Structures are given as C-alpha cells and as structure tokens.
Image (tube, helix red, strand yellow):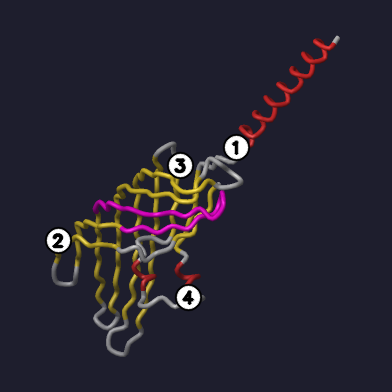
Amino acid sequence: MISRFLLFTLTLLLNINLTAQDVPQEVLQDKIYKKQFGFDANVLLNRFINFSGNNSSASPYQVIYRKYGATSNKRYGLGFGIGLEAGNLEPTALISVSFRFGKERFKQFGKVLPDNPEIRRWRAFYGLDWKTQLTVQHIGAADATNFTAAIGPSPLFGLLFQINERISISTEMAYDFDLTYSRFVSRNVIRFSADFVPPVAIYLGYDF
C-alpha cells in the first residue's frame, strides 16, 4: 500500500515538474520578437536636454527597421530633410532623401531581463550598410536647380540598451564612403569622399 502511494506521489510530482518546465518555454516562444521599428529620438530629447551644437542634423537616418535573425539582423534605414531659407538675395529650398539597407551581427551581454531570460540588457552590433542619397536644391534668385546623387558602403558599430523586453535605445557610429555625382547649372562634378559619422543620434526602438 505504501509503495503504491509513493509511486503515485512520485508520478504526480514528476508530471507537475514537466508541466512547469513546458509552460515557460511556450510563453518564451510568444516573447521572441522578430522585428523592430525605431526612430531618431533626438528631436524629442532636445526638448528636455540641451545638446551642444546641432547634432540632430548629423543623424544618418530618422527611421530604422530591423528583421531579427539568430546571430545577425537585416536592417533598413530611411532619412529625409527639408530646408527653406527665405533670404532677400537668394531664397533657397532643399529636399534630401536617403535610403540604406544592410546586415549587422550582434552579441548580447550583461544581465538577463527578469521577464524574458532570452534577452540581455546590452547588445553590441557591427555590420555594413549600402546607402543612397538624393538631394535637390533650388535657388530662387538665380532660378537654378542643383541635383546631387550619392551611393556607397558604410561600415558601422553600435550599442543597444534593452529597457524592457520590447523597448530599447541605441546609438551607432559609421564611416561613410561616397561616390557622388552633382549636376550644377554650368558643370557636372563626380567625386569620392570618406567621412566619419559620430554616434550623435539616439534611436528609440520597439520590438514586435
């Protein structure tokens, strides 16, 4: 009788233990997010923190989209700018649009999140973007339009801090290599340039 009771108790405890182990794994599967949408948060932060200089204009892009993988992510960025100077001599309008796509590898480190042990607080990432940019400038007084197109690779390195399992902040630096074609009123210019892009932008990301 006692042996049957012990066998029943052992079987019941084993079943409870297996069930307790299975449930968190199912929950974790629901918490493994596959994508991220983010934007340059400098515009919002400048309302509360006075950054020196006009660093927000140096952001390589304003919107970012990531598609997560096991050890690397696909990434896409979109940047845009509109400027208008209504001076007495030469009123100038400028429109700029840039698009980039690439891939990044990442490494998680630091403490795990209490709600999701699959995610750690910090993530270092590095990769390569291919970027394009189109800029159109119209000078009203001269009734002239200048056109510039650029393309080139951009190796990058960045850090991401996970606030919770969905929300994160990140920044990155890059080195841009550009092949640029410019068409002015009286001449065409082709040039190659290389510029360092410091980590001045802070991106707010949301995983889903």
* N-terminal-most mark, 2 or 1: 1
Residue bearing mark 4: 49
Label 3, label 4: how far apart the Cα atoms are: 32 Å
Q: Is residue 26 above or below residue 138?
A: above
Residue type (three-letter) at the residue carrying disc 3? Tyr
Residue plotted at (45% across, 42% down):
68
Label 2, label 1: how far apart the Cα atoms are: 53 Å
Q: Which residues are magenta?
A: 152-173
User: Which circle, 3 or 2, is nearer the viewer?
Assistant: 3
Residue bearing mark 2: 190
User: Which circle, 3 or 1, is nearer the viewer?
Assistant: 1
Q: Is residue 10 above or below residue 154?
A: above
Prevailing secondary structure class for the magenta stretch in the rendered image: strand
Residue bearing mark 1: 28
Residue type (three-letter) at the residue carrying disc 2? Ile
Residue type (three-letter) at the residue carrying disc 1? Leu
Residue type (three-letter) at the residue carrying disc 4? Ile
Residue 176 numbered tag: none
* N-terminal-most mark, 1 or 4: 1
* N-terminal-most mark, 3 or 2: 3
Residue 14 percent coordinates (x, y): 71, 21
Residue 85 lies in quadrant: bottom left
> Which sits in the foreground, 148 or 114?
114
* N-terminal-most mark, 3 or 4: 4
* N-terminal-most mark, 4 or 2: 4
114 relative to 156 in the view: left or right: right
SS at circle 1: helix
Whether residue 156 is in magenta: the answer is: yes
Residue bearing mark 3: 68
Furthest residue in direction right, as rendered: 1
